[in-house]
Image (cartoon, rainbow, N blue to C red):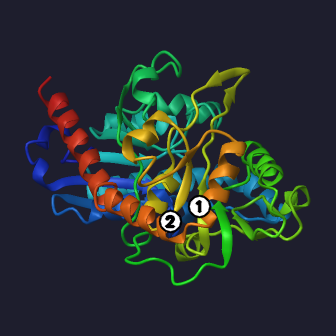
Amino acid sequence: MPMKPESGLADLGKLSNLRLLFVGESWRGSCARSLREAISRRPDVVLDEVDEDHWFTKPRSLWLRAVNRLTAGAFQGEFREQVFARVREFRPQVFMTYKGTLTDASSLAALKALGLVTVNVYPDCSPHSSGDSHQKAVGEYDLVISTKPFHKSRWKEVYGYDNRCEFVPQGYDPSLHLVEGPAPESDFDVVMVATWREEYAKLMQDFARNLGIDDLKVAIGGTGWAAHSGSFPRHWVFPGGLHGPTYVDWLRKGRICIAPLTRSVVFKGRQQPGDEDSTRTYELAAARCFFIHRRTDYVKSIFDEVTEVPMFGDSEELALLVRRFLDQPAERAKMAAAAQRRAVPAYSLDMRAAQVLDILRKFLLGQASR
C-alpha cells in the first residue's frame, strides 16, 4: 500500500494551488481530454494525469478484441499500480476521473484511505449501463459532478445512490470546436455525426421517407452506420468514425446539421431518463454550424428556438424544417452566428472547468470543516 500523501484533507487550507490527479481518455476530441486541458489551463490548479487509453486500447479486429479480453485482468492490475504510483509521487489532494469505467470500488476505498477526495465527472445518461462493477463504483465516489441536468434530483430515487451529485453541463473545446467564420462552401445539404443507435437509425429512416427529396445530399458520420447503409437511400454518404479536427470539418460540410438525442434508456426493463442535451449541443454552435436540435425543455432554456437553433420533436417536423431552411441561406447564416454568440464563451469547457472547480472547492471546505 502506498504511503499516505502529505497533501490530503489536512492541507485543504491551500486550495489556491489544488493538486489534482486526473484519470481519463487522452485521444484528441475526447471529452475527458478536453476537460483535462481546460482544468490544466487554470492557474490555481496543479494537475497530473493517468491516460486510460495508454493501458486499454479499443481495436476493431476480432482477434485483437479476443486478446484484450484475455489480458484485461493483467492490464487492470498494471493500470491500478500506475494510478497509485502517481499518487505516491505527485501527492494529490483530489483524485478525479471522467466516467471512471476502469476504476473499481476497491481502488476508490484505497484512495480514500490515503486521504484523497474522490470525484467523478459523469457524462453518460445512466451509470447503470456499463456493468455491475461500474454501477457499484459510481456510488463510492465522494462527489459526482454529472453533465446531465436530471441526475442531481433523481440520484437517489432512480439510480439508488447516497453520495453527493452536482450538475455542470457539457461544453465545447475552444482549441478544437471554435471556428471564427462561416464555412466557405457546403458539400452536403444535411450532415449528422453520431454513433449508430437504433433510435437514431429509425429517426433518419423516417426522415428520409418524410422528406421526399430524392436528390438531397446527406452524410451521416460516426461508427456503426456503414453496416446499416442498406436501410437508407443509396446516394447517402457514410464516412465512418470522425474525431478531432476531422469531426469539425465534416460538420461544416453541411448546409444543415442535425443534433439528435438519446431519449430511450431502458435498464433491466425499466425506463430511465434520456438525454436533454449532448456535447453536440455546444460543439455545433461553437463551430458556427446551422443546426436543428431535438427539442427538450433544457435546450430551449439555453438556445432560442426562433432566432438561434430550430428544434424538432419528430422526423416529420425535422423534414419540414429541413425543407424550409434549405432555401434560406441568409437566415441559416444569421441563426448560426447568433447561436455562436450565445455559446461563446459562456458554454466553453473553460467556463465549465471553473464551475467544476468551484463545486469541488466548496465540497472540500465542507469536508474539512467537519
Image quarter in which the C terminus is found:
top left
Relative vertical location of residue 19 with respect to residue 271 in this rendering, above or below: below
Q: How far from the left and from the top, in percent, is residue 173?
A: 40, 64
Residue carrying label 2: 332
Residues at badges 1 and 2 in contact (C-beta under 8 Å)?
yes
Relative vertical location of residue 139 with respect to residue 34 in this rendering, above or below: above
Label 1 secondary element = helix
Q: Quadrant of residue 301?
A: top left
Residue at the limit of the structure toward the left, as seen here: 13
Q: Quadrant of residue 132?
A: top right
For image coordinates 80% across by 62% down, the residue present is: 213
Q: Nearer the viewer, residue 192 or 15?
A: 192
Q: How far from the left and from the top, in percent, is residue 300?
A: 43, 40
Query: In the displayed structure, does residue 326 sit left or right of residue 339?
Result: right
* Amino acid type, label 2: Arg
Q: How far from the left and from the top, in percent, is residue 44?
A: 15, 58
Q: How far from the left and from the top, in percent, is residue 265?
A: 65, 32
Mark 1 or mark 2, which has the lower sequence index? 1
Residue at the limit of the structure toward the top, as seen here: 157
Residue carrying label 1: 325
Image quarter in which the N terminus is found:
top left
Q: Mark 2 Cα within 10 Å, few/some/many (few <14, many 20+)?
A: many
Q: Quadrant of residue 78?
A: bottom right
Q: Nearer the viewer, residue 362 or 58?
A: 362
For image coordinates 11% across by 27% down, the residue present is: 369
* Amino acid type, label 1: Phe
Q: Nearer the viewer, residue 328 or 225?
A: 328
For image coordinates 44% across by 64% down, the residue present is: 336
- Label 1 to label 2: alpha-carbon separation: 7 Å
